[in-house]
Amino acid sequence: MKINVLLSPLNADELFFTGKTTVVIDVLRATTTITACLAHGAKELIPVDSIEFAMKVSGNAFGGQTILGGERNTKKIEGFTLGNSPIEYTSENVAGKSIIFFTTNGTKAIVRAKFSEHLLLCSFNNLNAVAQYLLQLNNDVNILCAGSNGMFCVEDTVCAGMLIKAMTKMNSELEIADAGKASVILNDNYGDSTINILKDCEHGVKLISNGFEDDVEYCAQLDTTNIIPVYKSGVFKPLNFDQR
């Protein structure tokens, strides 16, 4: 079982992921928010890679059971019901509903990996559940860091390193590719302090300056849920690993 890390979505095209097992990480904030959304009872979440497509898909909405969520440059998009704050995705707001979701980086990375045989999302919030589930699948794994506008993002790479460390603690015979080893080294440099990572990184500083410090603190929480967003037929559904 080999673990590889892609430090940017630009490192591979859509066809690269065909038939593969892929984990997308966008700690600040898409994969954290999607996990929160499904953990709080959303029926499903539909990721899209453009605002225009989100609006087109939402044209079929009826009865208030489909809502738009997401952000552009950290702020909620005009006309959308929710932004990209995991704190917004409460049971009151999302239970039983379908969420059409767009973000500047996260959903673009997700859509790029849509041809994966197994596609799931990781954040600090569900990290150990994801590690255990991947070991159960027993496939080679590509961890895709969403990054920022195609550029390297330290927080996603550190999360990838932490995920690899969690997996190797359970199975010491895993083969780790070079980018995976670099991710582990970067994680070790931060001493597993998730809040320090997120407050120190470029995007975390930007979020805090824009009034989203509570989001940063939420995203820094480790292993608060066993819910794993799993992608199939164009939508994410929640998998509660404890129930398998």
Image (tube, rainbow, N blue to C red):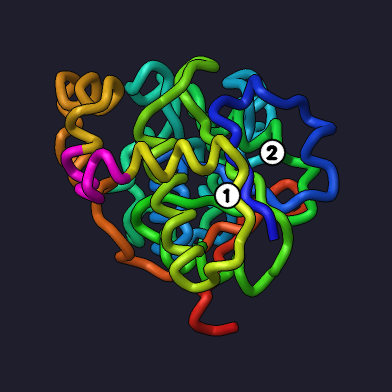
x, y percent for residue 190: 24, 41
Say what amino acid the circle numbered 1 marks. Answer: Leu
Say what amino acid the circle numbered 2 marks. Answer: Asn
Q: Would you say the magenta stretch is mainly helix, strand or loop?
A: helix
Q: Which residue is mark 2?
A: 60
Q: Quadrant of residue 175?
A: bottom right
In which quadrant will I find the C terminus? bottom right
Query: Which of the labelled discs sits on residue 45, or is there none?
Result: 1
In which quadrant will I find the N terminus? bottom right
Instruction: Relative to 214, say whether 230 is above or below.
Output: below
Secondary structure of the residue carrying tag 2 is: loop
Q: Residue at x 84, y 42 (%)?
A: 18
Disc 1 residue crowd, few under 14, some 14–19, many 20+, Cα 10 Å? many
In screen coordinates, is 206 left or right of 138? left
x, y percent for residue 211: 15, 26
Judging depth in this view, the residue of 120 and 96 nearest the camera is 120
The magenta stretch is 188-196
Task: Tell me which numbered mark, 1 or 2, is placed earlier along the sequence.
Answer: 1
In screen coordinates, is 168 left or right of 15? left
In screen coordinates, is 33 left or right of 62? left
Judging depth in this view, the residue of 73 and 134 nearest the camera is 134
Secondary structure of the residue carrying tag 1 is: strand
x, y percent for residue 142: 65, 45
Disc 2 residue crowd, few under 14, some 14–19, many 20+, Cα 10 Å? few
- For the question of whether residue 62 can be seen, the reply is no
Q: Residue at x 51, y 48 (%)?
A: 64
